[in-house]
Image (spheres, rainbow, N blue to C red):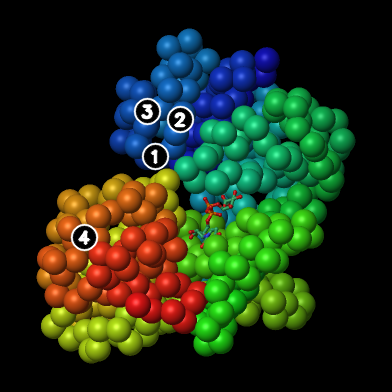
Amino acid sequence: MAAIGVIGAGYVGLTTAACFAALGHRVVCADRDADRISALRRGEVTAHEPGLPDLVSDGLRSGALCFTGANAEAFADTDFVFLCVPTPSGPDGAAELGVVRSVLAEIGSRDCRVVVKSTVPPGTAAALSRETGIALVSNPEFLREGHTVADFLHPQRIVVGAADPEDARAVLALYPQAPAIVTDPTTAELVKYAANCFLAMKLSYANSLAELCEVFDADVAAVTAGIGSDTRIGPDFLRPGPGWGGSCFPKDTRALAAAAAAAGVDFPLLTATMSTNDRQADRVLRRVVAETGPLRGARVGVLGLTFKAGTDDLRDSPALRVAERLVAAGAAVRAFDPCVRGPVDGVEVVESVGAAVEGAVAAVVLTEWPEFGALSWAELKPTMALPVLVDTRCVVPVEAAREAGMRVVRWGSASVG
Ligand code: UGA
């Protein structure tokens, strides 16, 4: 059992703290947001993460987990300090390291192993180690929002980068058994960006295939099934949609592109990955307008606002980008999302799918919530101004909607009707 301090109680920090406590370690988790800490002390978890509220309650009850607003309490008598603080995009896309730096300054010469979980550009731990005299260990996270607890407790791999192999061994020993990649800090940092950017690239590839399929009158679902069954390609992350988003892919693609550019390395795959994504919202708008005609003064019903299903997170959500385009085209947008209760800029957030699509010239599915696959279009259609359904996530059973009289625009397919 180790004594662990975790700095940051966001998705990553809170999951790290609660899971380490569940694994038998003693954990102090610090965050500068006083309201968040008060709520967590009462066992209230606002993040939409299955399993996390229970782990937090269990940890508080057993005493294995506690929360503080003072970082120093998370450094006191700890063997390890995990940095789970934000590294947002700066104006040029590069990751900003201000919070990481200020926490390191607070840690000073304390005798504990300092582990960076925050996503930082390659070379950061090495440079900051030289600067501060703290031998930083890099231990990137691969947690998907909405699955953070399961991903933490059953990792596909654990990556640890340390200058001293003893530090790497000590960090690995905190975790459940999993395939381990032990390397130097810079390589570990690059693994994180390489993973997220590759997944983003795969998605932009799938979205470009969808665009091609629409032009050639082919079916992207069959194309992605056809390539995904090749084990060298794999079936995951090939579902086309309105573009990728969230708190990680946009930030990490920008940061790696900035790091590559600063190092003088031409990385056109990365820039194309981003520019392809930037086009997707306009593509959605075009397909809506092709069915409805000009949107000025018309009502559009948006189904789904979060950046993916299974989370309440709106950060960099492709659905918001599309809603913004619809509003700019003159539409009045009403949106329903099972996990969002307004307000959202420019959009009227309503309490049901029925309220979102009533009087609308189109219903546009932008997040793959499973409940959107079980809607009764026979009931919804008579309330709409036009029976147009644009399903960018391919969750609606097409035949049933067609039988109900909807004109269904399938994403990644030319067929409408
Ligand atoms: C991502 C990575 O998947 C995690 O491994 C990583 O740890 C995390 O970023 C991070 O860096 O912290 P997350 O941001 O939770 O996790 O989101 P994903 O599940 O990867 O989805 C990202 C975007 O891709 C979403 O907008 C989603 O809708 C979209 N997507 C995903 C598709 O459009 N199609 C797919 O087939 C899969």
Q: Amino acid at mark 3?
A: Leu
Q: Name the one closer to the observer, 388 or 265.
A: 388
- Label 1, label 2: how far apart the Cα atoms are: 8 Å
Give the number of marks.
4
Residue at 69%, 77% in the rendered image: 269
| Mark 3 surroundings: few (<14), some (14-19) or many (≥20) residues within 10 A | many
Task: Work out which quarter of the rendered image holds the N terminus and state it.
Answer: top right
- Label 1, label 3: how far apart the Cα atoms are: 11 Å
The local secondary structure at tag 2 comes to helix
Q: Is residue 302 left or right of residue 11?
A: left
Looking at the rendered image, the disc whose residue lies closer to the viewer, 2 or 4, is: 4
Residue 297 in the image: x percent, y percent? 13, 83
- Label 2, label 4: how far apart the Cα atoms are: 39 Å
Find residue 114 and report its image quarter.
top right
Q: On the image, numbered disc 2 is attached to which residue?
A: 52
Looking at the rendered image, the disc whose residue lies closer to the viewer, 4 or 1, is: 4
Q: Is residue 223 left or right of residue 283?
A: right
Q: On the image, numbered disc 1 is attached to which residue?
A: 47
